[in-house]
Amino acid sequence: MSASGYNFAYLDEQSKRMIRRALLKAVAVPGYQVPFAGREMPLPYGWGTGGIQVTASIIGRKDRLKVIDQGADDTTNAVSIRKFFARTAGVATTTRTAEASIIQTRHRIPERPLQHGQILVFQVPIPEPLRWLEPRETQTRRMHALADYGAMHLKLYEDIARFGRVTTAYDYPVQVNGRYLMSPSPIPRLDNPKLDRSPALQLFGAGREKRIYAVPPFTSVKSLDFADHPFAVERWSYRCARCGADDSYLDEIVVDDRGGRRFICSDTDYCDSRLQPQATLP
Amino acid sequence: MYVAVKGGEAAIEAAHRLLDQDRRGDPAIPALTVAQIEGQLRLAVDRVMAEGALYDRQLAALAIKQAAGDLVEAIFLLRAYRTTLSRFAVSEPIDTARMEADRRISAIFKDVPGGQFLGPTFDYTHRLMDFELADDAAAPESDAQAPGPASAMPMTLPPVMGWLEQEGLLEPERADPDLPVGDITRDPPQYPATRDVRLQALARGDEGFLLGLAYSTQRGYGRNHPFAGEIRSGRAIVEIVPEELGFAVAIGEVELTECQLVNQFKGSAGQPPQFTRGYGLVFGRCERKAMAMALVDRSLRAAEFEETVTAPAQDEEFVLSHADNVEASGFVQHLKLPHYVDFQAELDIVRRMRAEEARQEAAE
């Protein structure tokens, strides 16, 4: 199948303009979920349609795109989305975090610190951080309008009271610019500190739920916590079995049928660049 | 060095090749043509057009072929194509009273001016397997070609609801020409939604989901006492008003099925007792869908008639945000995508909590 008969990056220019207007609003009000008229994409809902629409609206011919899923460039869905843009936009793609101008991601933030000028596009399944506390959109919009986030603090408090710790392992809620409560998308807690004052522009797209939100560069992003129970990230007692990293998020891999396990970096580019430091860019 | 089990480009390409083979099936049997699907699986084509929200029999048939008969997948294909089309014009409201009907029934009057016409319906068939159809050679082609009694039908039929309306027994349908009509393909969903937006969402909502909801209202979860006032199927003219002309011109015909329900209403502080309406309109002959839609439409009007909202079918946000099968199918199936990072995070938490519990137990 060829991409002939479709516009550059699939979406028509009117749709892209509509999405860019939503993005501008999102950047102007950090953390606020801007409703937008999400389009059907040729990939299924829940597989990154929000991120794809955002990327399609901002990508230009000079961009270099990296797509990761679970931190890796070679997971099937990352391969599929990268191919989609290579085919519909004909843009250059890369697996190197340092070389990419746009990085579309699902569930991770690259280990290598992002630079000013780079854009990180998150695929978001459920944009509403309050959704598991209140199923109704009408209610949660009101709660955001009033900055009524007591329910979330109560949930965290109940976790601590019952289990001695907050049991939210990923998609840990954050407050952006001291105002809006925001879902960072299902990234592990280890990635939360990378959101804070990042030099990169961070855009979030939720296709099925038709919401866009953003964290502009150098914006404060604070993971919710309590003075006596400060936010903490995961720490392993293992290192990556491949590159030896002790600071990256590790995937656990079952290596034999006796329950043997190894841990390796979920960020494949980070792992590769540590093994071949001569190949990494400045 | 151990390489993690992560799929690659080669795996995807191999899967696509297998899918192609699987769809084609036994090469000794001739391939289905798009024309055969269009002509002989017409109700499947109708459903794909209705929920794919694009009236194009040929494309819908192609989608069914490409999807190997998986109608939800075919609907998805058609939607993803539809979204790339530029908007040519917005049509004038279709006048279903002027529909060239081949089926029109009413369950509230024994006879109605213009008459009742069953048309092509499964309704009164005995659901016995017709083994003659299995013998491809012996299919009674001649019978199918014979002119049916439908040719005796009048061109247009006056709507049944008109007579109830004249007597003031039925709520009047108020169309405000100054109010813009919503467009769910161009505006993000907002709640509470207006009825035009609700009807659009229901028209392309999943037939199975709406059928279940409609059924639930009949079993007491938000009961609304419906009667089938009129159900009609046929071809209606689509007109647009080109700016340079300033008057309506016909651009084509679409086949539609319309269902008008009449529902009991005991009246409220502001309204006298009267009958109220539920409305369903779909492409093709998706009659089951049109009826389910009308039942759910009436349920969703609960607040309008000061009825207590107690059941899922009356809950606008619940119904509208879960009715779209392209959205639902995608999100349910996204669980197949890797979730190692999230699962790792959960594993870590569970292990830590178990370790802590074990430590506490040991200490006690």
Image (cartoon, coloured by chain):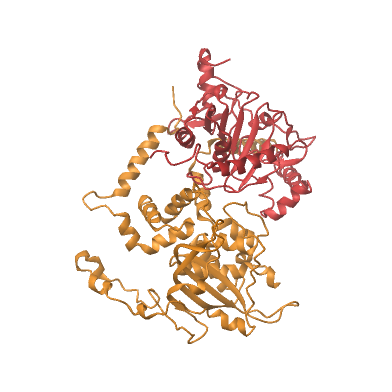
Is there any visible trace of residue B140 in the rendered image? no
Q: In this view, does B87 lie to the left or right of B67?
A: right
At horizontal 66% and vertical 24% (from top left) the residue drawn is: A116
Outermost residue, front side = B245
Quadrant containing the N terminus of chain A is: top left
Percent position of residue B206, x then y? 50, 60
The answer to whether residue A162 is above or below residue B32 is above
Instruction: Choose top left, top right, bottom left or bottom right for residue B353.
Output: top right
Residue A249 % position (x, y): 58, 28
What residue is drawn where x is 54% and y is 59%? B245
Q: Which residue is depicted at the point 64% across and 28% down?
A: A235
Q: Which of B96 and B200 is in front in this view?
A: B96
Find residue B100 and report its image quarter: bottom left
For the residue pair A229 and A123, the one nearer the viewer reads as: A123
Q: Which chain is red?
A: A
Q: In this view, does B348 lie to the left or right of B209?
A: right
The C terminus of chain A is located in which quarter? Answer: top right
Answer whether residue B318 is visible to the viewer in this image: yes
- Residue B356 at x, y percent in the picture: 66, 36
Chain drawn in orange: B
Residue sitting nearer the eye, A195 or B188: B188
Q: Check the image and report above or below for B272 versus B89.
A: below
